[in-house]
């Protein structure tokens, strides 16, 4: 059975107290002033709300003393209600203000983060994966309902148009590592890409495309580093499941660390890593961690697929490795 919320409990308490006060006053006047129920109720109501029409007044001393007590009690009750209403409003406003200030401070501290424009179906999945991989990010969204979801999930967010210079600057686009524009409209994605590229010429920008004719070319021309069409990817994925089902299943397992407990990850070699200027045999990656180096990507963009044991690892290289999650995490500490 669902338990009542704190707000509902407060409302029920106030309503029950008010009804009790009215019944108490009615019973008091019926007893002390020999009034019938409706007259006693009427006198109680105008006393509680301090109306005082004067058509009915207590005659006996006991009734007047009871009226004084009832007025003081009812006035105190009204002040109590107003204080609770004010407390709730101020508390809510202050909490919202403190949360927004805290969030803006966290956004100001972000470095090498990703800016996600749009929190639709694709945006939600991107954020979930970035969260799972502990990559810093924030979301720019204009829809109020989606903003509520962002708050509930604990993501950093800014409300507004992602194509506005002020919003992108507030999101730290000059410090960002990348931007993903995944709103529904190609025109909006194009405008966001154009604005982001103007603010940060070196930014990695990934743009969503509907797959329409000429859209990818226009997005590239506007400054997108990568253009992704979810519909084309979905179609290729479905076709591969028919043509190469085992290969597709294997790739799925390695990309999400599934039943095989395998993981495919990319690791950048730092300048102080012990692996610098060593070949794969000397690095002992396979021997020490039981991890397979699938590809080595050099800083100039060239890639060595299925590298030879004599292939040399350089500073700044990106190693694409396949292995158990724990082993890869151990290798990452040496990078």
Image (cartoon, grey):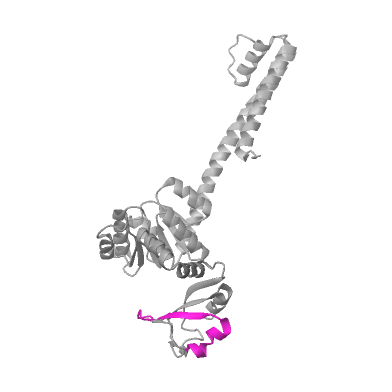
- Please tell me whether residue 313 is drawn above or below residue 238 in the rendered image: below
Which is more toward the observer, 231 or 43? 231
Report if residue 201 lies within the magenta region.
Answer: no
Q: Residue 307 vs residue 18: left or right?
A: left
247, 188: nearer the viewer: 247
Query: Would you say residue 176 is visible in this rendering?
Result: no
Q: Determine which quarter of the picture holds residue 233.
A: bottom left
Along the line of sight, which residue is nearer the eye, 127 or 107?
127
For the question of whether residue 24 can be seen, the reply is yes
Point out residue 134 in the picture as x, y percentages from the top left corner: 51, 66
Residue 12: image location, x then y, percent? 64, 32
Q: Residue at x 59, y 35 (%)?
A: 83
Q: Position of residue 205 (x, y in %)?
A: 35, 65
**Residue at the spot x=29%, y=61% of the render?**
194
Image quadrant where one finds the N terminus: top right
Magenta region: which residues?
279-303
* Above or below, 264 relative to 159: below
Q: Is residue 285 magenta?
A: yes
């Amino acid at each position: 059975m669902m338990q009542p919320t704190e707000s509902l409990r407060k409302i029920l308490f106030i309503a029950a107290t008010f009804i009790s006060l009215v019944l108490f006053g009615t019973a008091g006047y019926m007893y002390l002033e020999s009034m019938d129920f409706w007259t006693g109720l009427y006198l109680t109501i105008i006393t509680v709300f301090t109306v005082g029409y004067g058509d009915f007044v207590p005659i006996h001393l006991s009734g007047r003393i009871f009226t004084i007590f009832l007025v003081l009690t009812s006035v105190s009750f009204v002040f109590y209600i107003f204080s609770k209403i004010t407390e709730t409003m101020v508390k809510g406003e202050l909490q919202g203000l403190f949360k927004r200030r805290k969030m803006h401070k966290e956004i100001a501290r972000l470095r090498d983060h990703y800016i996600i424009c749009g929190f639709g179906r694709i945006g939600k999945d991107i954020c979930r994966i970035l969260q799972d991989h502990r990559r810093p990010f924030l979301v720019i969204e204009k829809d109020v309902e989606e903003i509520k979801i962002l708050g509930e999930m604990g993501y950093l967010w800014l409300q507004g148009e992602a194509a506005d210079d002020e919003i992108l600057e507030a999101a730290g686009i000059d410090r960002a590592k990348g931007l993903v524009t995944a709103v529904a409209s190609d025109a909006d994605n194009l405008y966001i890409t154009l604005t982001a590229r103007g603010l940060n010429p070196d930014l990695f920008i990934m743009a969503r495309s509907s797959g329409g004719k000429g859209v990818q070319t226009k997005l590239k021309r506007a400054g997108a580093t990568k253009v992704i069409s979810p519909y084309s990817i979905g179609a290729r994925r479905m076709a591969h499941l028919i043509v190469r089902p085992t290969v597709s299943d294997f790739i799925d397992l390695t990309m999400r660390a599934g039943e095989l407990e395998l993981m495919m990850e990319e690791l950048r070699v730092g300048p102080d890593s012990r692996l610098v200027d060593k070949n794969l045999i000397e690095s002992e990656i396979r021997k020490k961690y039981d991890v397979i180096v699938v590809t080595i990507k050099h800083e100039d963009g060239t890639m060595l697929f299925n590298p030879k044991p004599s292939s040399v690892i350089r500073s700044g290289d990106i190693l694409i490795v396949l292995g158990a999650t724990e082993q890869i995490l151990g290798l990452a500490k040496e990078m």
